[in-house]
Image: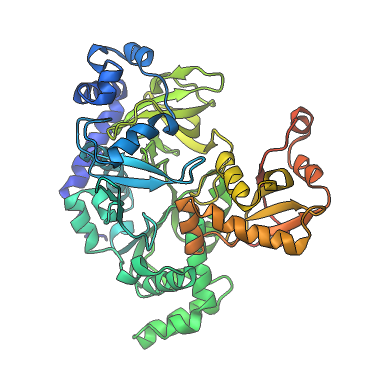
Amino acid sequence: MNNTRFPPVFTTARQSFQAALADARSTQERILHDLLHSNAASAFGRRYGFERIHSYADFAARVPVHTYADYQADIEALAAGTPGVLTTEAVTLFEETGGSSGGAKLIPYTPSLLAAFRRAVLPWLADLAQFRPQALAGRLFFIISPAGRSRSHTAGGIAIGNGDDLAYFGADTAAWLAERTLFQPELMQQQSAERWQWHSARVLLSAPDLSFISVWSPTLLLTILNTLQQQADSLLATLPDPARRRHVAQALACTPMDTRTLWPQLDTVSAWDSHTAAAPAAALRALFPHVHLQGKGLLATEAVSSIPFSGSPWPLLAVDSHFYEFADEVGGIHLPHSLDSGARYRVIVSTQGGLYRYDSGDCVHIHGLLGGVPQMEFVGRNSLTSDLCGEKLTEAFVQAAMRQVDAALPQQALLQAVMDNPPYYRLCVDAAVAPPERAQQLAAALDHALGANPQYAHARRIGQLGALQAAAMDDLQTYAAGLHRAEQRLATRKVSLLLPPCVLPDAQL
């Protein structure tokens, strides 16, 4: 029987989210009203006449859909220290995420935006406590932000990076989690992939009472598990209890490793399990047959869109967090309650951080409406993007990186994601212009250039992505065309720079 006492805020957060689900249309109308009223005096609000907007129809007519590029000048002004640009509320920090052509982009955070994130992550955690209390009964392991990231500041002195992942949960919950969360300073200090993986494995092995693991990409956890087996001798030497050493040694000697013996109390692993994460998530399920693998909802640096919640087999729209619109495949824009089951849409979100009608580029499949609330599955990015574990490499950024290496490279090579363990990218090069040795040199240089994207650099640093490799091909265009269905081959005039991902014959997930 579980006797864990959960923070009182869990009950409040779960009940509040349930109330929002029960009256989703009114909740969304209130959020839009609050966004417009609170920020009418901002430079952006004055530019688009927020004070004269009295309905969603007015909002849609006055404010166009924006991309990040449309906001770049405003965000640069905020980063330089100019107040009141996008919101009347002060920007307290920036978070950094992958960009399209520049490789990185800054997202402004206000206290209201952090509160909006909490209105999603607290109900998720509270719901987990309600229906899987054993998941939170032991030690917890979270990986939220990049490990080893140094906290820097903008030219205007505003911090880049929160500095404390648990702050996203609010002070009361953060204090409760801190007592139970596995954490060692060296996890934030390690710069090499090998050392970070080793220390992560050591921290996990030190906790026989581990009950919950939360990571974004399942490939990250698979990488740590690989380290457990490959570095077993050195890791065993760190365990002070002889009985624990003996049990761990026996478990690691099994094929596959005996995860039930390693962590007998482990109840839940939370990780992405859709789109390109589906295959590595299946590998995790095979390694943890006794554990509940909970697929994460859609949460980006800019906004949270959906969370897993009881009563729905698919993540539900985080209806109490931001204001949401959905663009269909022919350009129409719809509100959440009017979406069609079985259709695919692109998420457009207005946030408390000052991104209004922001085109996230995230595509979702609607599995149904639960009381007017969309049940959503993330199915990829609208723009041509490769995203194995959160790096979001767009065609524009890859093209710019290739040109840094060699101006002619975009005409001579294509980039392809490979679903391996760990996954990696390979540069497919025309053998006529780049023999194997030259192809390897180009791949190494491109690997470095792609590091301008912070998520790619982080994934490479911790070993979540393997080194970029090269493959010299005699007929590159024929190979690329063969990756598409017959009707697509006939309709395609130009081969895309980013090829569809593949699984090599010898790949072992």
Please give the name of the residue rendered at 51% of the width and 60% of the height, measured from the top-left corner: 460
Residue 266 shown left or right of residue 50 in the figure: right
Q: Is residue 420 above or below residue 209?
A: above
123 and 223: which one is in front?
A: 223
Please give the name of the residue rendered at 56% of the width and 19% of the height, measured from the top-left corner: 330
Scheme by which the image is coloured: rainbow
Quadrant housing the C terminus = bottom right
Please give the name of the residue rendered at 24% of the width and 20% of the height, measured from the top-left corner: 33
Q: Is residue 102 above or below residue 22?
A: below
279 and 328: which one is in front?
A: 328
Residue 27 can be seen, yes or no: no
Which residue is farthest bottom?
242
Q: How many marks?
A: 0
Q: Is residue 103 above or below residue 365?
A: below
Residue 423 shown left or right of residue 29 in the figure: right
Quadrant housing the N terminus = bottom left
Residue 466 can be seen, yes or no: yes
Examine the image and state in which quarter residue 336 appears. top left
Examine the image and state in which quarter residue 137 appears. bottom left
Q: Looking at the picture, how far across and down is residue 429, in whole percent? A: 74, 52
Q: Looking at the picture, how far across and down is residue 482, in whole percent? A: 78, 42
499 and 173: which one is in front?
A: 499
Q: Is residue 74 above or below residue 328?
A: below
Please give the name of the residue rendered at 37% of the width and 39% of the height, measured from the top-left corner: 302
Q: Looking at the picture, how far across and down is residue 430, in whole percent? A: 78, 51
Q: Looking at the picture, how far across and down is residue 140, in whole percent? A: 32, 62
